[in-house]
Amino acid sequence: EMELPLNGCRVKKNDLAILYSFIDAAGTIFFILAWLWLRAFESKESRMLNRSTVTASDYTIRLKSVPADTTEKELAIHFARVTGEAVAAAHLAFNNSKEIKQYIKRGRIMKQRFNCIQRIRYEKTMRDGQPGQRKRLRNLMRERESLTIAVRQNDERRSRVIQERQDAIQAFVTFETETGFIEAMLKYNFNWFQRYCCCYPERLKFKGQRLHVEQAPE
């Protein structure tokens, strides 16, 4: 066993190692306790903030699936009848993936057109009078015109997609009072067996379809 001189005292190396081990253990325990306290404090504060803060989700339910031909008026009438409370608004979410794809494609074409215009400017300013400039400019002008036509054709296709009937895939229903929201959540609070088997009440179905109701995200 080695002894280390510390301020005129001699301490065994093994004793010093044990001391450091206890300090490390104490620090680890303190860190774990602090983390547990912070977690409990954060959860408590979150509950207090939720109780004292009013958001749209306190009045709004989300329907994870609805019939494709659903209208907002039909939803409002259905939930007003089921809950006995007034509905402030009903909004549908549509399957507009085709339209989004057209926008993405248009963005790519516009980027190509922008790069082409920048190359034209470079040829006119930095390579003016150099051999082959006119040929390069003619090619770039043709490319720009082709991309401009592609943008116009994309806009026409996107307009046709927008005019097509879009299927509703989800819906959000907002009640005028929190009571309506609570009533809706209670009436549609089914377990797995009730939701997917034969125990689903007919009066709660919408157009013959079972609804999966949850609180809308904030």
Image (cartoon, grey):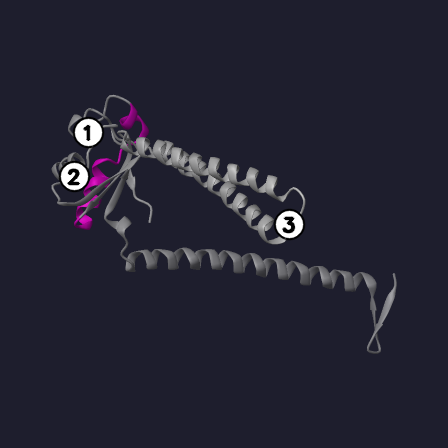
Q: Rate crowding at label 3 as few (under 14), some (14 to 19) or many (20 or more) other CA atoms within 10 Å.
A: few
Residue at label 1? 206
Which amino acid, by three-letter code, is at mark 3?
Gly
Magenta: main secondary structure:
helix
The nearer-to-camera label among 2 and 3 is 3
Q: Rate crowding at label 1 as few (under 14), some (14 to 19) or many (20 or more) other CA atoms within 10 Å.
A: some
Residue at label 3? 129
- Position of 151 relative to 50 (above/below): above
Visible residue check, residue 212: no
Residue at label 2? 76
**Residue, x 17% and y 50% (percent of image)?**
177
**Horizontal and vertical percent position of residue 199:** 23, 24
**Horizontal and vertical percent position of residue 44:** 38, 57
- Res 213 → quadrant: top left
Tell me where the magenta segment starts and ends, as one range. 176-196
Q: Rate crowding at label 2 as few (under 14), some (14 to 19) or many (20 or more) other CA atoms within 10 Å.
A: many
Asked whether, in this view, residue 130 is left or right of residue 207, the answer is right
Q: Which residue lies furthest to the right in this view?
A: 2
- Position of 122 relative to 83 (above/below): below
Q: Do the residues labelled 1 and 2 touch (CB within 8 Å)?
A: no
